[in-house]
Image: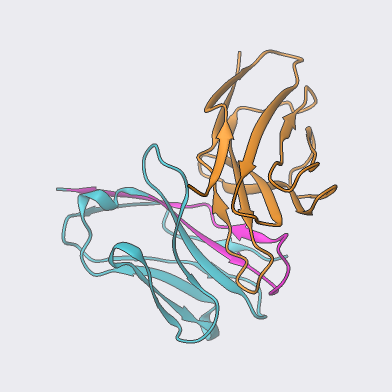
Chain colours: A cyan, B orange
Amino acid sequence: AQSVSQHNHHVILSEAASLELGCNYSYGGTVNLFWYVQYPGQHLQLLLKYFSGDPLVKGIKGFEAEFIKSKFSFNLRKPSVQWSDTAEYFCAVNGPRGNTDKLIFGTGTRLQVFP
Amino acid sequence: DGGITQSPKYLFRKEGQNVTLSCEQNLNHDAMYWYRQDPGQGLRLIYYSQIVNDFQKGDIAEGYSVSREKKESFPLTVTSAQKNPTAFYLCASSALDREETQYFGPGTRLLVL
């Protein structure tokens, strides 16, 4: 069965530090990949997604993620975090393509950014 | 203003009681989903529906029931058979296109009295 691993459960950074959150998935076929963010008290929002094409995907608020097929990874990055990036981040994988019943989520990474 | 609405924001359940969570979307999406979010466990799929009058069990369907009588609506009932219902419940919808991006509602927090 498809699974998604987020190895960082809780990350604490100071403002302006660089961020990389890991995401690995198990399915070897064609997949859609997503990062969602949940700010405190707000609903889950789409941060970015990979469907096809350029493996480096740009999202909102300066986030980006790189799809590395050989490593089954889709890590999220931001060069300089802000206090407002404090949130919980979820990686999700949908596959095989066309199988809408299986958007599998990782367990989430809680990011705390201190001024 | 398009989107997904869930009500109520907070819901309290007594022992042995069934409660129903509402989810409505005006995005004209064919597919709708219910997830349960627990701390440290991410989101787990309860039920999903790709078409009116049809739905499928997800990974943790026991103790829950759904209906899909209208395209816009996908209510979730938490039955008395669900022994640990305290959680945050999220509804989502998606178009049945190649990208299948799911968009989420604001959630309902269910608490047991």
| Number of numbered discs overlaid on the protein picture | 0
Front one among A48 and B95:
B95
Residue at figure coordinates x 51%, y 65% from the top left: A34
Q: Position of residue A48 (x, y in %)?
A: 44, 66
Q: Which residues are magenta?
A: A88-114
Q: Is residue B69 above or below residue A75?
A: above
Q: Position of residue A37 (x, y in %)?
A: 42, 53
Q: Is residue A71 left or right of residue B76?
A: left
Q: Is residue A107 magenta?
A: yes
Front one among B95 and A9:
B95
Q: Position of residue B75 (x, y in %)?
A: 71, 36
Q: Is residue A78 above or below residue A82?
A: below
Q: Would you identify the image quadrant in which residue A92 lies?
A: bottom right
Residue at figure coordinates x 70%, y 63% from the top left: A100
Q: Is residue B82 magenta?
A: no
Q: Is residue B61 left or right of residue A12?
A: right
* Quadrant housing the C terminus of chain B: top right
Query: Of all residues shown, which one is farthest toward the front?
Result: B1
Q: Position of residue A104 (x, y in %)?
A: 63, 59
Front one among A79 and B98:
B98
Residue at figure coordinates x 50%, y 86% from the top left: A53
